[in-house]
């Protein structure tokens, strides 16, 4: 049994983890993408290498896969020429397949991707003046059904494997031409200014200078804390100094509030936390973020107060989608401030104008309302920027992700919503 992934199946209590092996391929070869060094060494040993050789080769292959981004064993120049075909006969370097790549008029890019077993999901790249953020998916679909979110209208098809999660970051590096050529090599112009770490530390040290992809947010399709093990294993490779080498300070995981997994997220992954709060009363949050019926506001905010690693230097982001006449009054803004202060949270608030999608029952608050809401929070000493919607013309903005293959009828949607609510208890 491989250690690569666990798949959750939505059930009446919490999703039940079921072991999932490496996704099998018809030709019998094993895909190495998503596997840690130790697992690669085990596979090499099982294929016939002695323990010492397996460990050494695994270290080299890990570096080529994740740090240099090669897609063929033939390119692994420090591995003996005769060894490379041996590897290629038994293993593959997989990437999710790109079905469609779209470019927004504002520079945002969206890719529709497909897993080896035919499921589609999306990733989005958002360039800014001083940073470039990759929005990564953790599941195909979502078990939850937040009322304002397009992904929430999809059934959970399955959890993404570590390879499919880390594969998104690798594909983005491919598309942006941002693989380092390695210490000592001349590097492309886009890599100039790269703060390249050559010691054996296990954390990333790339600086933002001159690079396009600088930050990662787990804010694509799915609830990352309902696919905890795979998200953790993928992010460990992303953070590994000899892997994709992105600092944990540049990675943010967004959760709708899966309280029992939040402490583990801080302890075992250590990335920044964003919480999809969206409402300050039980009544409204129960309606728009139904997981609130299971883990209420008090429990959620207490888990935030206890989040390992949170401090004034590393504040927790509270996302708040602005829905007209639903959660956007002055009183809501004041209650938000009161709650954040009551729990003494090192907080910043991110106000997200609602992004519409076909069939959505909400409207976005007016710009004046959003500005007033932001002022109230800001005047209380809490930063509350309004997020500029990006990539709306290609349906790449927050909450618009939903693959065409998954479009369901209204009747199916209603039935699904009932099922999901029953599962939440
Ligand atoms: N499942 C996780 C992460 C993915 S959603 C979560 O819920 O946090 C990423 C963010 O987009 C969340 O804050 C979510 O609430 C927000 N979002 C979803 N639909 C939206 C929409 N239509 N307009 C604006 N933001 C939306
Ligand atoms: Fe799932 Fe997040 Fe969308 Fe809610 S907002 S349905 S948790 S993806």
Image (spheres, helix red, strand yellow):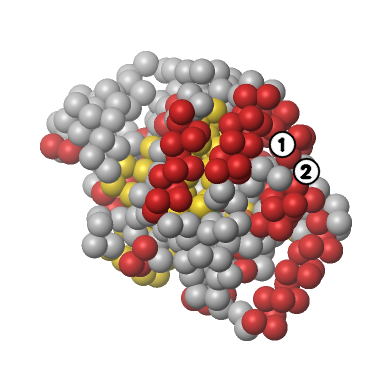
For mark 1, give the secondary structure. Answer: helix
Closer-to-camera residue (217/53): 217
Q: Which quadrant of the structure image shows residue 36?
A: top right
In the rendered structure, the answer to whether residue 120 lies left or right of residue 305 reads left
Residue in view at x 53 percent, y 59 percent: 324
Q: Position of residue 193 (x, y in %)?
A: 19, 26
Crowding around mark 2 (Cα neighbors within 10 Å: few <14, some 14 to 19, many 20+) is some
The answer to whether any part of residue 411 appears in the image is yes
For mark 2, give the secondary structure. Answer: loop
The answer to whether any part of residue 27 appears in the image is no
In this rendering, the answer to whether 390 lies above or below 301 is: below
The answer to whether marks 2 and 1 mark residues whose Cβ atoms lie closer than 8 Å is yes
Closer-to-camera residue (360/144): 360
Q: Quadrant of the C terminus?
A: bottom right
Q: Position of residue 78 (x, y in %)?
A: 32, 33
Q: Position of residue 186 (x, y in %)?
A: 15, 31
Residue in view at x 37 percent, y 43 percent: 133
Label 2 or label 1, whichever comes before in sequence order: 2
Crowding around mark 1 (Cα neighbors within 10 Å: few <14, some 14 to 19, many 20+) is many
Q: Spot the residue most to the front.
A: 330
Q: Which quadrant of the structure image shows residue 335?
A: top right
Residue in view at x 55 percent, y 43 percent: 330
Residue in view at x 42 percent, y 18 percent: 200
Which residue is labeled 1 in the image? 300
Which residue is labeled 2 in the image? 295
Q: Is mark 2 within 8 Å of ligand 2?
A: no
Q: Position of residue 415 (x, y in %)?
A: 75, 76
Disc 2 from disc 1: Cα separation: 7 Å
């Amino acid at each position: 049994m491989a250690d690569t992934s666990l798949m959750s199946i939505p059930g009446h209590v919490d999703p039940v983890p079921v072991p999932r092996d490496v996704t099998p391929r018809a030709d019998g070869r094993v895909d190495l993408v998503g596997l840690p060094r130790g697992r690669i060494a085990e596979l090499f040993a099982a294929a016939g290498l002695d323990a010492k050789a397996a460990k050494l080769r695994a270290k080299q292959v890990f570096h080529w896969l994740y740090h240099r981004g090669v897609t063929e064993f033939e390119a692994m120049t420090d591995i003996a020429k005769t060894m490379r075909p041996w590897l290629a006969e038994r293993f593959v370097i997989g990437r999710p397949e790109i079905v469609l790549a779209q470019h927004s008029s504002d520079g945002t890019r969206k890719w529709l991707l497909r897993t080896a077993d035919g499921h589609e999901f999306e990733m989005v790249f958002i360039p800014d003046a001083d940073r470039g953020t990759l929005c990564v998916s953790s599941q195909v679909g979502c078990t939850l059904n937040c009322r304002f979110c397009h992904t929430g209208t999809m059934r959970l098809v399955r959890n993404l494997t570590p390879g499919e999660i880390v594969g998104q970051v690798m594909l983005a590096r491919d598309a942006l031409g941002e693989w380092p050529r390695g210490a000592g090599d001349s590097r492309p112009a886009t890599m100039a200014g790269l703060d390249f770490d050559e010691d054996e530390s296990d954390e990333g040290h790339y600086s933002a200078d001159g690079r396009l992809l600088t930050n990662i947010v787990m804010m694509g399709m799915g609830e990352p804390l309902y696919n905890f093990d795979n998200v953790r294993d993928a992010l460990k490779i992303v953070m590994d100094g000899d892997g994709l080498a992105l600092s944990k300070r540049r990675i943010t995981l967004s959760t709708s509030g899966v309280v029992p997994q939040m402490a583990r997220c801080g302890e075992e992954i250590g990335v920044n936390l964003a919480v999809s709060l969206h409402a300050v009363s039980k009544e409204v949050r129960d309606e728009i973020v139904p997981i609130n019926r299971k883990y209420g506001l008090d429990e959620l905010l207490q888990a935030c107060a206890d989040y390992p690693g949170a401090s004034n230097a590393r504040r927790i982001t509270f996302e708040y989608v602005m829905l007209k006449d639903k959660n956007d009054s002055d009183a809501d803004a004041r209650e938000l401030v009161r709650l954040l202060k009551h729990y003494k949270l090192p907080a910043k608030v991110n106000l997200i104008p609602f992004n519409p999608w076909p069939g959505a029952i909400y409207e976005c608050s007016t710009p004046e309302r959003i500005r007033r809401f932001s002022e109230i929070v800001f005047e209380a000493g809490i930063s509350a920027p309004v997020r500029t919607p990006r990539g709306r013309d290609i349906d790449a903005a927050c909450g618009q992700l939903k693959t065409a293959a998954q479009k369901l009828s209204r009747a199916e949607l209603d039935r699904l919503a009932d099922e999901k609510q029953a599962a939440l208890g």
